[in-house]
Amino acid sequence: MGRITKLRDLIGVIKDKVSLSKATLVSNSNTLSIHLAVLRTTTHSPSIPPDDNHLATLLSLGYGSRATASALVASLMDRLHRTSDSSVALKCLVTIHHIIKRGPFMLQDQLSVFPASGGHNYLKLSAFRDGANFATVLGFFLCSSSGAIDKDKQDEGVSSFTNVDLIGDTDSMVGVMEEICKVPDSLHVDGNKLLQEIMGLVGGDFLAAVNEISLRLSEFNERRDCLSFGESVELMCALKRLEECKERLMGLFSIKKVSTERCGVQLES
């Protein structure tokens, strides 16, 4: 098994070098830096997360023109959907996660273009298959949850939301919690920095979701007398789903029990 793994690693290194050489030869001067940034950030190395310097270089390209940001996102999505290697796919998703969390506005804006509005920046990877290790399973999870957190997160106060919007937001956040519950029990992340980084991102999304849900539940507490029967039923269904997640979440993030319990207290009020 070790020999097979080493062979896969060697093949990955060769693929990276070939891809970089090809990009240098076929890319024009306007797109070369974009393609190289994407390739260097999403290498085939199975146990190494995206290099901080390469990631910073990629994100810095988003401060240029909108055309550059669009080309970068297109290149990243093309890399994600063309690869059959779980490590490359994971690094693409990790990079997308960093763009959502701390990337320039123009990169975030380009990521927000979904097929419904004419774009092709979808994260549907149901057809992806690698099967070599746990990275494949974790990649599906990261894909499901990383974008949902920030997509539904609003900068303005929740007090300005309508009841319908507030219920929809809460339902989305509960959906994130349900996705987090799907993390496999037997992840062997020791020594694998890539998987460790992903689990760190998952933990961050967990805390963000707890905070967002707590904020919305506090608002619902203020609006109890203003909810219609139908809205009350929808809210209770979402809260029941959240209650069913508590035990699993507390097992996954034992050091975060205080935050989870805060959510639980509001559920019971």
Image: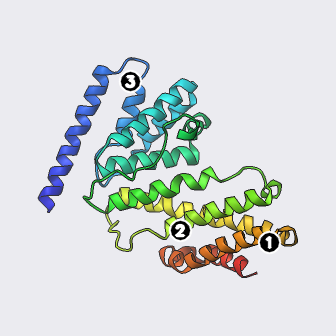
User: In the rendered image, which quarter contains the N terminus?
Assistant: bottom left
Q: Residue at x 42, y 29 (%)?
A: 34
Q: Is mark 3 on a helix, strand or loop?
A: helix
Q: What element carries label 1?
A: helix
The residue positioned farthest toward the top in the image shown: 29
Residue 161, position in %: x, y?
79, 55
Residue 244, position in %: x, y?
57, 78
Q: State the residue position of label 3.
A: 32
243 lies above or below 160 = below
Mark toward the start of the polypeptide (3 vs 1)? 3
Q: Residues within 10 Å of mark 1 (few under 14, many from 20)?
A: few
Kind of residue sitting beneath label 2: Glu
The residue positioned farthest toward the front in the image shown: 230
109 lies above or below 124 = above
Residue 211, position in %: x, y?
67, 65
Give the CA separation, mark 3 to mark 1.
58 Å
Tell whether label 2 touches label 1 (CB within 8 Å).
Answer: no
Q: Residue at x 66, y 73 (%)?
A: 237
Kind of residue sitting beneath label 3: Leu
Q: State the residue position of label 1.
A: 229
Which image quadrant for residue 106? top right
Give the CA separation, mark 1 to mark 2.
25 Å
Q: State the residue position of label 2.
A: 178
Kind of residue sitting beneath label 1: Phe
Left or right: 267, with 18 as reference point: right
Marks 3, 2: nearer the viewer: 2
Colouring used for the render: rainbow
Which image quadrant for residue 216? bottom right
From the viewer's side, name the closer residue of 128 and 149: 128
